[in-house]
Amino acid sequence: MREKREVVVYCLTLGNVYEDYPFHDDKWCVMRHKASKKTFAYIYEKNDQIWVNVKCEPQWRDFWRSTFEAVVPGYHMNKEHWNSIILDGTIPKRDIKRMIAESYDLTKGKKDAENSRMD
């Protein structure tokens, strides 16, 4: 997984989400839960590569950072709860998807959970 669109398409499969461009900059895409509007992924271009900011549990935050050089403290985010994934081809697609899905789960609010049950 190396392309912005590929990440957006995967995020859309998680259900009850939408892509947003709140910064009026096509280089930044924000993936949000429909019901709560909470963000679970920031997808952007930095240093000629695609980066994805994801929320994570502190024990997983450290695991991902120590496992992959391309996982770093969250760019412009709270470093305790967010990681940035640099899509440079060194992280297996399944691990990228796992980190995004974890962020999705962590940011899912009560409204989102209720809406999921209604679908």
Image: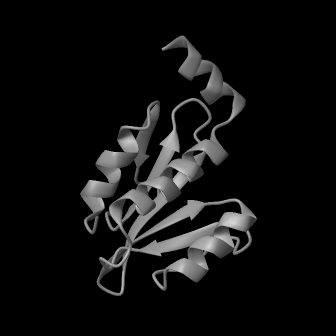
Q: Residue at x 25, y 65 (%)?
A: 3
Say if 117 sits above or below 22 in the image. Answer: above
**Horizontally, is 91 left or right of 67 in the view?**
left
**Horizontally, is 34 left or right of 20 in the view?**
right
Q: Residue at x 68, y 35 (%)?
A: 109
Q: Position of residue 87 (x, y in %)?
A: 35, 74
The scheme the figure's colours follow is one colour
Residue 75 visible to an observer of this rendering? no
User: Residue 73 versus residue 95: which sits nearer the camera?
Assistant: 95
Q: Position of residue 42 (x, y in %)?
A: 48, 61
Say if 21 sits above or below 2 in the image. Answer: above
Q: Residue at x 52, y 73 (%)?
A: 84
**Horizontally, is 49 left or right of 96 in the view?**
left
Q: Quadrant of residue 86?
A: bottom left
User: Residue 29 versus residue 92: which sits nearer the camera?
Assistant: 92
Residue 117 visible to an observer of this rendering? yes
Say if 48 sits above or below 14 in the image. Answer: below
Q: Position of residue 13 (x, y in %)?
A: 36, 37
Q: Residue at x 52, y 58 (%)?
A: 99
